[in-house]
Image (cartoon, helix red, strand yellow):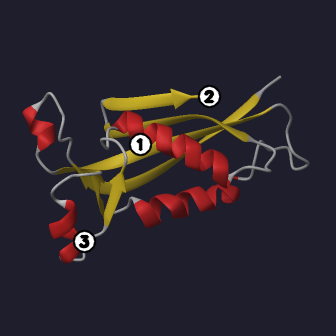
Amino acid sequence: MKYSITKTFYFDAAHRLLESFTRKCRSLHGHTYKVKLSLQADQLDANGMVIDFGELKPFKDYLKQHFDHAVLLQQGDPLIKPLTLEKQKITVLEKAPTSEILASLFLNEGTKLLENKNARVSAVEVYESSTSRAEVKV
């Protein structure tokens, strides 16, 4: 039997997609992102849980530190230098800051932050709007 839980997190950030096929996404714009982190366990812990939701605080802190109210840019974006000079909060990603790339990044980081726990990260969903989401599963 497998047990699973999902915790939802939110953060606000701006981004742009330099190599986007749509002109709208080439412009700097923002979203209130919703991130669903799903965890799975083969058995419940001594407290009858997959994991205590409180143990997911390191992931929440990671999102707040690196992504909340940040400008998400791809390496090589010409906006990096002027925004840095203006002391703006910037997170530079190796690839375009798409929902798919963010989901993959969050899955990897969540896995690292929660290693040695009873549960393991099984999926991450990233919503950039109420109707658009990307998902990555283990």
| Residue for badge 2 | 138
Left or right: 30 in relation to 134 = left
Is residue 20 left or right of 52 when viewed as pictured?
Answer: left
Gap between marks 1 and 3 measured at Cα? 20 Å
Q: Which residue lies under the disc numbered 3?
A: 88
Please state which of residues 104 and 135 is positioned toward the viewer in this rendering: 104
Residue 80, picture quadrant: bottom left
Q: Measure the alpha-carbon separation of dots 2 and 1.
A: 15 Å
Residue 20 vs residue 132: left or right?
A: left
The residue sitting at 53% across, 64% down in the picture is: 61
Q: Residue at x 19, y 66 (%)?
A: 81
Measured from the top left, where is residue 39 in percent x and y?
67, 38
First reached walking from the N terminus: tag 3 or tag 2: 3
Q: Quadrant of the C terminus?
A: top right
Q: Label 2 sits on what residue type? A: Val
Image coords of residue 58 (percent x, y): 61, 61
* Label 2, residues with CA under 10 Å away: few <14, some 14-19, many ≥20: few
Task: Identify the image quadrant of residue 100.
Answer: top left
Q: Residues within 10 Å of mark 3 (few under 14, many from 20)?
A: few
For residue 102, which numbered disc appears in the image? 1
Residue flagged by tag 3: what amino acid is it?
Gln
Sequence-first disc among 2 and 1: 1
Residue 28: horizontal and vertical position, in percent? 14, 51
- Give whichever of discs 1 and 3 has the lower sequence position: 3
Q: Label 3 to label 2, Cα distance in Å?
A: 34 Å
Number of residues whose C-alpha sits closer than 10 Å to that of mark 1, classed few (under 14), some (14–19) or many (20 or more): many
| Disc 1 to disc 3: CB gap under 8 Å | no
| Identity, as a three-letter code, of the amino acid under mark 1 | Leu
